Amino acid sequence: MATGDGSAHPFGSANTVASMTAARGFASDNCSGAHPRVVEAITSVNHGHVGSYGADPETDRLDDLVRAEFGPDARIFPMLNGTGTNIAALRAMARPHQAVICPETAHLAIDETAAPEAIAGLKLLTVPTPDGKLTPEIAHTRLADPDDIPHVAWPKVVSIAQASELGTVYTPQQVRALADFAHSHGMLLHMDGARLANAAAALDVGLAEAGAAHGVDVLSLGANKNGTVFGEAVVFIDAPGAPDFARGLADDFEVLRKGSLQLSSKMRFISAQLVAILEGGLWRELALKANRAAAAIGEAVAWIDGVELAQPVEANIVFIALGLEKARAFSDLCAPHRPLIFPLGDVGLVRLVGSWDSQVEDVDRVVADLLSVLPQGRGTASSG
């Protein structure tokens, strides 16, 4: 592990961020505060009167940035929160009697209560995956049999998360394969981009190259997990070459957004935050810090006996496996930032999430807590 001053640490010095009054942890990237430049952006537009409901200069600037990033036909609609962003996006893509194919670990399925069903009226067709990612072969198992109509909900959308809930990242080639599969079966591809910045940083590509440039039709663009105070967005790609049924999806979205309870009257404050993280590539800088913190934890865990990485660390999420009672003891030591534990028999699967403001001392502390719950208070470093 690096020394506590952070001087040689890959995700920067502890002095990168102004001193924090509350301890940082790895419970979730939703627990982090806002980046100072985002707060400054909110303050900078907090003067005078401007048009409401998006008729303001900041939203115009955001429109220009999104077209530069995602293509000349892309259209962005700032939203209030992540669940509302996903549900409104799906409402624009499918009718209430239709269905959405998604991994059984998808945020849509396990963390958004019954919103897809209750608000969008869509049936979720979940499917097990080995790593949180869909493939055309896996998604194909949820296609409806035409002979079963009208007794089944016909899938209209394939929904994937970039990065996935298990912290895995789709390559551009994998996204394109899913887009081709979806389009060939008359379906649309939706991407939940709550951690799109982390995925793009991990792939060392732009935000569009992490998915939208490879056949995604509608993107739920996340920001809360990467340095903003509030606000997300729906982006309609409308890319040249997309099938006819995938074009024009944004045409009546302004009305649908209002009916989905996601239209902000003072939209300039959401748009200003999105401009702050998109302009100049701040999104990448913040996502890289979160990813590097997760990677540092993963590298330390790999040398500790009695703890295993459940899977390679690809973005900013780490899953570690250890005895269930030890996992609970470790979680208690992390209080008040207790990580999630998923009991699997006598094994506890612990999720740790790096944030944009994670520092070297935070990594050192969480690794020390982990060591302290192992036999004799230490793990034994593996040889070699």
Image: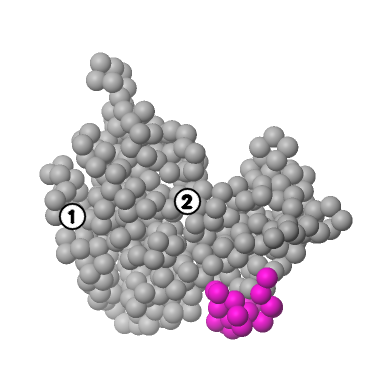
Residue lying at 35% horizontally and 82% vertically, measured from the top left: 47
Residue 10 magenta: yes
Q: Which of marks 2 and 1 is nearer the N terminus?
A: 2
Disc 1 is placed on an element classified as: loop
| Whole-percent x, y for residue 379 in the image | 78, 57
Residue 155 magenta: no
Callout in the foreground (2, 1): 2
Q: Is residue 251 above or below residue 54?
A: above
What amino acid type should be assigned to the residue bearing mark 1? Ala
Q: Mark 2 points at which residue?
A: 168
Q: In this view, does 87 lie to the left or right of 202?
A: left
Residue lying at 60% horizontally and 47% vertically, measured from the top left: 310
Q: In this view, does 247 lie above or below 198?
A: above
What amino acid type should be assigned to the residue bearing mark 2? Thr
Q: How many marks?
A: 2
Dividing the image into 4 quarters, which one contains the C terminus? Answer: bottom right
Q: Mark 1 points at which residue?
A: 239
One can see residue 339 in this view: yes
One can see residue 84 in this view: no
Q: Is the magenta stretch mostly helix, strand or loop?
A: loop
Q: Write the start and end of the magenta stretch as one range.
A: 1-21
Residue lying at 46% horizontally and 67% vertically, measured from the top left: 287
| Whole-percent x, y for residue 157 in the image | 29, 39
Dividing the image into 4 quarters, which one contains the N terminus? Answer: bottom right
| Extreme-top residue of the structure | 147
Disc 2 is placed on an element classified as: loop
